[in-house]
Image (tube, rainbow, N blue to C red):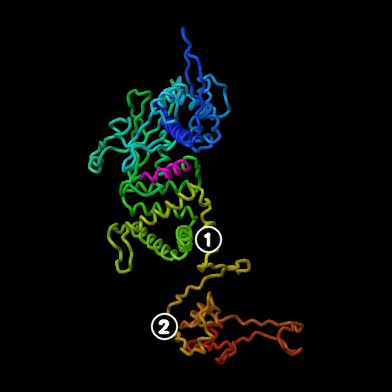
Amino acid sequence: MRNRELHDALREFALETAALLSTELDAGEELPYDVVEEPGTGSVLYRYLPLTAEFIGARWDVIGAMPSAKRAAVALGTGAEAYLRLRGLPAADDAEPALRAMLDRLYEDATDFQFPEDRFERVYSEVERTLYEGTMRTAVVAAVQGLVLESDRVDLGGGLMLARGDRVDAPAEAVWPLGPGERERATGANAVVALERDVEADSPLPASEARVRFRRLLTAMRLFKPGRVALAGLGWGRADGGVWQPVPLALGGPGRGEPWTLGTEEEPELRELVELVAGARQSGRIAWSLARFEMGCERSTDVEALSDNMLALQSLLEADDDDAGRAGLTQRVAALCAEERERPRLRRRLEAAAALERRAMAGTPVDPDLDEDEDAGIDAPRALCAEIEQHVRAVLRDVVCGYLDADLRSVADDILIAGDEPIDIRAHDTRAEPEPGPELEVDPQEGLESDLEPLPDDPAVNATTRTPDGPGTAADPRSAAWAVTALPGPRTMREAAPPPRVEDRVDDADDRLPHDDDDDLTIADEPLPVEPQELDSGVTASADWDDDPASYSAPI
């Protein structure tokens, strides 16, 4: 058998057709017959010939609409024209006439429609010889480490399959573990991945195609669920049952964790995901994050993989590596990966993961199985790392499958805006901001405890003096400007030398200051003493100001 996918598709179609036609006969439908003369000499002999082709033709509309018929037509493809030529029938644009011709051949001279297993294999051999004349069958096989299959064989489409190594035709080097570490962990024969392909007689082995398809299969398996799954770096190939030859693959490092088990009920979902990954063409941040995620799957420890997964999240959500970026990252990941009531918990988990990553980056030893704080309910680092990896896996899988748009930042923001949870958004108008001036180097904490008096507990006072939402004014006792004003000592140093005597006559026409028409205004040679007075704002001149007001001034 050279094409198991085609074989299984045609067999399923024939079995379903047999069940339908048998049900028709059991319901009272009659199979028509024709009487024909047997050739020869002497007396004329007659024979009843069942007209199965007419019986099938009368019900072809129902047969052709079956799902198995459509799958068989796709599997037969362009080979349908060659089979019609073999049967001496006119060519057709689709595969349905070839499928009908195969059924006529299968039930030729039959008096019922019980499925004939032996005859089907002979008919299929005719189809296969017709399709693959002038070609050779090639196969490339590689061991899949850490994979456990419940089925003997899992067909993934296009000649690609997973199988138990001892249940298929594969070299012993791929089937049985060779390295000491592999032998210790192995419980039997390796599972293998194989690509079977028909090529022209003078064509080489499809090694390049095998590398690409094996790599995409490994990506799909890692996106499907966690587990220790990896491909061997060396594969084996042969053509038409010849000698197995080594084929270098070099498809990545070993995995970690528990074995990757594929249940029978999971096979259709994996087959669909493999098809989607094979057809996806990711680029930009998605491709980079997917590659980083796979690097994490190949790390030797969970804590090492944590950095890869955190970097993947930062790239997916375009988060900056600062306090604001990290805060936005936790909010957006929680929006994408959790229901609204679970988002606060996930944000705390993400913050704990970021703290664990910083510890690892600082070189602090981390035991992945040791609880950080059992009383606080914090799991072991291994569980925390596994949870973050699962969130990265889920987001990437949804993007690859088309469930999420690649612009994940906008998707997350839309979810947050639509939810009931409050969002911390800070904004200010920068269009009319003054040019920044020189900064005054003052320690805002110096002397606060000695000079600032606590606010009274009187509710009437507190009702009118609330904590400002943002930066306050200089008259607000809670503001930073007030804290600077309350510091002891001089505020602004003037020049050490006294200012020069300057006389400036002001034009009488200037009516900005009240004065008599015949008087001249001058700047006094000596400043006038100023008595301390209480200002309208409630600010009283500080007692620690210097007696010489010509040396210092205080802000009001």
> What residue is pinned by disc 2?
449
Residue 192 % position (x, y): 34, 36
The residue lying at 42 percent from left, 44 percent from top is 270
Q: Is residue 268 above or below residue 547?
A: above
Q: Real-space Cα distance between discs 1 and 2? A: 45 Å
Identify residue type, mark 1: Ile
Task: Point out residue 528 in the picture as x, y percentages from the top left corner.
Answer: 59, 89
Magenta segment: 263-276
Tell me which residue sits at (36%, 58%) in the image: 357
Q: Nearer the viewer, residue 458 or 92?
A: 92
Residue 346, quarter of the rendered image: bottom left
At numbered mark 2, what does the secondary structure look like: helix, strand or loop? Answer: helix
The residue under label 2 is which amino acid type?
A: Glu
Q: Determine if the magenta segment contains residue 275.
A: yes
Q: Is residue 153 above or below residue 197?
A: below
Query: From the viewer's perspective, is 373 left or right of 266?
Result: left
Q: Quadrant of the N terminus?
A: top left
Q: Position of residue 228 (x, y in %)?
A: 33, 46
Q: Residue at x 39, y 46 (%)?
A: 266
136 w.r.t. 61: above or below: above
Q: Residue furthest front?
A: 43
Magenta: main secondary structure: helix
Say if residue 68 shows up in the picture. no
- Nearer the observer: mark 1 or 2; the answer is 1
Location of residue 339 in the rendering, given as x and y in whole percent from the top left corner: 46, 62
Q: Which residue is mark 1?
A: 415
Determine if the magenta segment contains residue 27. no
